[in-house]
Image (spheres, grey):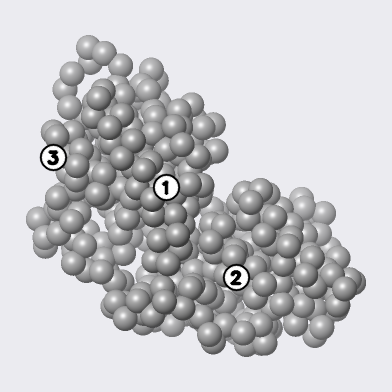
Amino acid sequence: MSRLARIALVAGEASGDLLASHLIAALKTRLPDARYFGIGGPRMLEQGFETWWPMEKLAVMGYVEVLRRFREIIGIRRQLKRRLLQDLPDLFIGVDAPDFNLSLEADLKAKGMTTLHYVSPSIWAWRAGRIRKIARAANRVLALFPMEPPLYQAAGIPVTYVGHPLADRIPMVTDKEAVRRRLGLPRDIPIFALLPGSRQSELEYMADTFVETALHLWSRQNHAQFVVPLATRETRLLFEAAMFRRQNRFPTALRAFRLMFGHAQDAIGAADAALVASGTATLETMLVKRPMVITYKLAPLTWKLMKHRARLPYVGLPNILSGQALVPEILQDDATPERLAEALWREMTDTERQDRLTGEFTRLHIALRQNTAEKAAAAVLACLPSR
């Protein structure tokens, strides 16, 4: 190639940051002098990525929540598009964040730029009409899940199934006792992982419910502990605030919480069961092969709109991938601390059910283990125009 490759990427949340960081690392072995820039998070920065805006600016979930920050987000997209069109990169890769990326990709593609969308939007779950927008936006889609490529092939959209990088990174068996030793956690007590989400907007709706659920479990088993991995300083502050609001009522119980920056896989691996906000964390919990209860809360209007447009009866990835209700989903108004605590206790204590789950989770793990970063990098290199 006659000059250095220049690749623009946009990731809008922690899961996209992880995917993009693995992709950049794989690309660097083939294009060691390439430049990577756009919008990304800390893991991408570790790979030498140049971010122009903080990724947290885009990490908003739900119609109502997006409307609150609509002008700021649109302003960022407008400035980013202008900057990219002034000095065209060789390739643009939108990593998830479809509400932000697809419109941007469509504008860039219309100007002759090659665009990839990494992570198929959930057209199999809701908003199936979005596939027409994807056709306008992306020269190729990199799909993480095996049920996605046939949908794109039927619509005439180039697609590459790359699997999921978490399936490559997470071992088939995670030794609970070894993880507890590494974290300095007791070996012989109930430990629950609490994963309330990676976005500030998720913590605003769910932090109180997660803390209250843990307190209900603690009242049942007062030597239980709760490990809480949090993605950012902002989400940690929101969770700490939810704890502080209960300090006068439960001073002893709150000492059973252990908050961590990141290390979600360790938290899950140390746990007997996990309470998980719907999203990538449900996949991570499945791959670590721990029983879980999936929950989620949104603004009431957002919830009504999303429920109306849903095509599948499930929101959690383990259930979607298996096509059955493998793990409990307790959502929105049904997600009371009492119900969540009862379901978590059931999942932790039913050993026969745990054996069945482990078998199904292993089968899904094998299907997703595809050496994702290498496959994605090969697809990106194939799309780079000759220079």
Q: Is residue 249 left or right of residue 42?
A: right
Q: Mark 3 points at which residue?
A: 110
Up-down relation of residue 204 to residue 183 (above or below)? below
Name the quarter where the C terminus is drawn: top left
- Secondary structure, mark 2, is helix
Of callouts 3 and 2, the N-terminal one = 3
Q: What residue type is labelled 1?
A: Glu
Give the quarter of the image for residue 123: bottom left
State yes or no: discs 2 and 1 in contact (Cβ < 8 Å): no
Which of the two discs, 2 and 1, sits closer to the camera? 1
Q: How crowded is mark 2: few (under 14 residues within 10 Å), some or many (20 or more)?
A: many
Alpha carbons under labels 3 and 1: distance apart:
24 Å
Against 315, is 177 above or below?
A: above
Camera-side residue of 257 and 333: 333
Check disc 2 and report the residue beneath it. Answer: 206
According to the image, label 1 marks what residue? 72
At x 59% / y 65%, what residue is drawn? Answer: 204
- Between 77 and 211, the one nearer to me in the picture: 77
Q: Distance between the residues labelled 2 and 1?
A: 24 Å
Q: Which residue is drawn at 27% across and 32% down?
A: 82
Q: In the rendered image, is residue 234 in sight?
A: yes
> From the image, which quarter does the N terminus lie in?
top left
Tell me: 56 left or right of 249: left
**Residue 43 position within the rendered picture, expressed as x and y whole percent measured from the top left:** 53, 38
Task: Report if the CB atoms under discs 3 and 2 are less than 8 Å apart.
Answer: no
- Residue at the location (53% across, 53% down)? 170
Whole-percent x and y of residue 205? 57, 70
User: In this orientation, does residue 188 appear?
Assistant: no
Distance (Cα) linking label 3 and label 2: 40 Å
Q: Where is residue 17 in the image (x, y as percent from the top left)?
A: 47, 44
Quarter of the figure with residue 342? bottom right
Q: Which of the two discs, 2 and 1, labels the residue nearer the N terminus?
A: 1
